[in-house]
Image (cartoon, grey):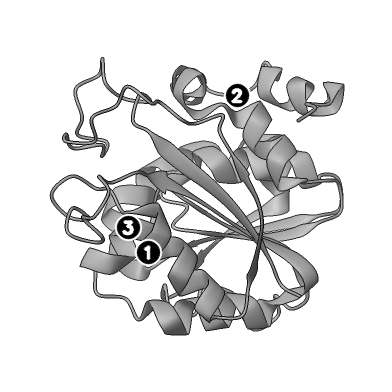
Amino acid sequence: MTVSDAIRAIVAAKDRSDEDRKLDAGRHPAELLAFLGVAPGQRIVEIGSYQGYTAELLGRAVAPNGKVYAQDPASFNKFTTKVWEGRKNNPAMKNIVHIERPFDAPAPPEAKDLDAVVCGLFYHDTVWLKIDRAKMNASVFKALKPGGVYLIYDHSAREGTGVGDVKTLHRIEEKVVRSEVESAGFKLAATASFLRHPDDKRDWDASDEAPPELRGTSDRFVLKFVKP
């Protein structure tokens, strides 16, 4: 996978916050943007944008005339409002709109024929939050244009655990995600290894509550699906 100079410049931008930069070593944002295939002018929805780390990177990548819809449900306002207020004055945010939408219908009505939908480190949460994932994935399928990308990356659970660790360890088994998304009509186009950590025993909580020395070291799968 080749990372272009344009993408490297996005990640290296001097006006990115220190808080975001601290996450880069564990998130590999340049590789993520390159694997997604993001480009200027694209229209993208991010599911579970939360505090906006990935949304801002996507907004920079689709500039000057693309658009990113950063989705969170209204119930997340207590976690997100302060951070998004802090981001709003950054010029990089002009291509991003933070929207309040339910997880099972993450794209607003005007967001049709999208180039991509991204769900990063959050699919497992939709399980313990009891979201209708079949409805969510069908909604994503409908919102994407033919050939559009549905990119999902998440913390890997131990083989055979399925969705058993989604709330306690914030992990999900890769094959569960593949099965559910393919059932919605998507085709798996590619996988990536830039977030893999083979030494991870997958027996610890990989959420934001993880000890600082462990953040960014969980084994994570990266799956790129396309709408036929």
Residue depicted at 35% across the width and 68% down the height: 74
Q: Is residue 188 left or right of residue 170?
A: right
Q: Which of the two residues, 81 or 19, is positioned nearer the viewer here?
A: 19
**Pointer 3: what residue?**
124
Query: Residue 40, how many percent across, how many down?
Result: 86, 46
**Pointer 1: what residue?**
176
Q: Mark 2 vs mark 3: give the one in front.
A: 3
Residue 16 tag number: 2
Which amino acid, mark 2? Arg
Instruction: Evaluate if marks 2 and 3 touch, with contact meaning CB atoms under 8 Å apart.
Output: no
Residue depicted at 42% across the width and 72% down the height: 103
Real-space CA distance between mark 1 and mark 2, rounded to the nearest whole angstrom: 35 Å
Q: Secondary structure at mark 3?
A: helix
Query: Residue 65, how many percent across, how many down?
Result: 86, 53
- Number of numbered labels in the structure image: 3
Q: Mark 1 vs mark 2: give the one in front.
A: 1
